Amino acid sequence: MKAFRRVISLLCLLALLLPGLAAAEDGFSTSYTYTYDYWEEPQESPDAYRVATVIDSMTLGLENLEGIRISKAQSLFVRDDRIYLCDTSNNRIIEILREGNRFSVRRVIREMKGAEISTFSQPYDVFVDPEGNLYVADFGNQRVAKMDRDLNWVQDFVKPTDATFDQSLNFLPKKLVVDVAGRVYALCQNVNKGLVKYEADGTFSGFIGANTVSISMGEYIWKRYFQTKEQRAQTASFVPTEYENIYIDEDDFIYATNTVFSEYDLKYDNAKPIRRLNSLGTDILIKNDRFPPIGDLTWLEGSDNYGPSKLTDITVLQNDIYVALDRTRGRLFGYDSQGILLWAFGTKGNVEGAFTGAVSLDHMGYDLLVLDQLENSITVFQTTEYGQTIYDASETYLEGRYDESAEQWRNVLKMNANYPLAFRGIGRAVMRQNRYEEAMDYFRLAHDRENYGRAFKLFRKEWVERNIWWIVLLLAAVLIVPLTIGRVKKLKGEVVAHELGKVRK
């Protein structure tokens, strides 16, 4: 009997575990990927991405090729099927070729041909334009160096001699992007006026996108009226902070991340850890969710590991979905073009898929590549069926295929029934099809008050247009019937009065 009970118990346990194991095989993890619900509570979800491979010195064969391992790499850049890695401590750029899921070293770039200073010194960032020209943020040599695809030196972008650039500062470029016209935008250490901008010919043309200063009225009054000159000199000045990283999308908008802010400014959108800068340096990032894109919505205070997300890098996919990398907890946050969180995943650690020093991020198609400067490796993430369906649903909506988009969002709900964005996506799709009452139901499920209000206004307008004749008849009845009744009563009263007059005579 006891043996029978044990068998039954074991079978029951397997019945409970097997669905979970099968779900995990299909991408339904219960501890890795999450989103936030309406009440800011994290909600576990299926994995949007999974580790495809990890690239390091051993897998690339660098030890056999040069005998030197990657050391404290600071940045990576993707162009087509090539990955360009800034191996900062070794003063070199490693060009990696991708063929399917195979990665190999195409060449190691240590110097330029024809340059007065031909070698690099602490290269922090690299950018490759569509023509194959390479731009290197050569930090130690205080320049941005440009060379062609054959490594022939073209020109250097150096410290501006303009009066607007503090001549007491060294020119220390750490990050850079280049637009379609060949204009260079450099993020320099100790420069808080924004990005240093150069024309294609190397002419300095000013700064764009300076961070704004966020101070409270109490701080201003205290410093302005109650502190002595000596005290003011000892306290920090109200000056803008530097950006952390930059990325330029296909439309030449620059995405910038900022990691210096007050925790209390985040949810009130005063910190703006992610910005989208136009040609004038104005932030035009769309934020249509309850909270701006700031990474984690909840955190414990008082510790670097438990504080708010510090978004150290960002990349933008072709569908206007952008992904930010959090160095605080080693997480990735994906947002759509409206600033709505699609998914979040990642953690700190030295196991596959975790990071100890995540520092740079880029994408290759839908794949995400994360550089870990402490592990000296690149982790390649590929979409699961769940993640790809979210992308497909978003893209078909933007392309105007609303029926298809709604169906894809329903497929997302089959994989994750607790995903507010799917309800919102279906609601937006059916609202575009003039099915306003149905859209209201989906927006209610998504707790989307703004879109619910829009759908309600359109539904009300449609209802009025559909029932206008009944409304007119009702209004007419409301106005005419009382008048008619009053007129009848008046006539009746006159008749009665007339009859009474006759009787008296």
Image (tube, rainbow, N blue to C red):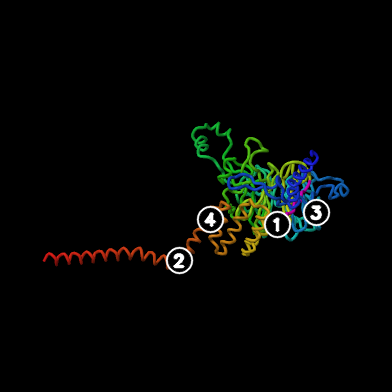
Secondary structure of the residue carrying tag 4 is helix
If you read the primary sequence from the N terminus, does the residue marked by circle 4 or circle 3 appear first? 3
Q: For residue 214, what is the image quadrant?
A: top right
Q: Where does the magenta region start and end?
A: 377-388
Residue type, mark 1 in image: Gln
What is the distance, in whole Å, between disc 1 and disc 3 at their CAs?
26 Å
Instruction: Tell me if I can see residue 186 in this picture.
Output: no
Q: Earlier in the sequence, mark 2 or mark 4?
A: 4
x and y percentages locating residue 100 in the rendered image = 80, 58
Question: Could you say which disc has been placed on residue 388 in the image?
Answer: 1
Q: CA distance from mark 4 to mark 1?
A: 27 Å
The residue lying at 79 percent from left, 38 percent from top is 2
Quadrant of the drawing holding the N terminus: top right
Q: As displayed, is residue 494 above or below residue 157?
A: below
Label 4–label 1 contact, CB within 8 A: no
Residue 275 shown left or right of residue 465 in the figure: right
In the foreground, 246 or 112: 246
Q: Position of residue 118 (x, y in %)?
A: 79, 50
Q: Which mark is residue 467?
A: 2
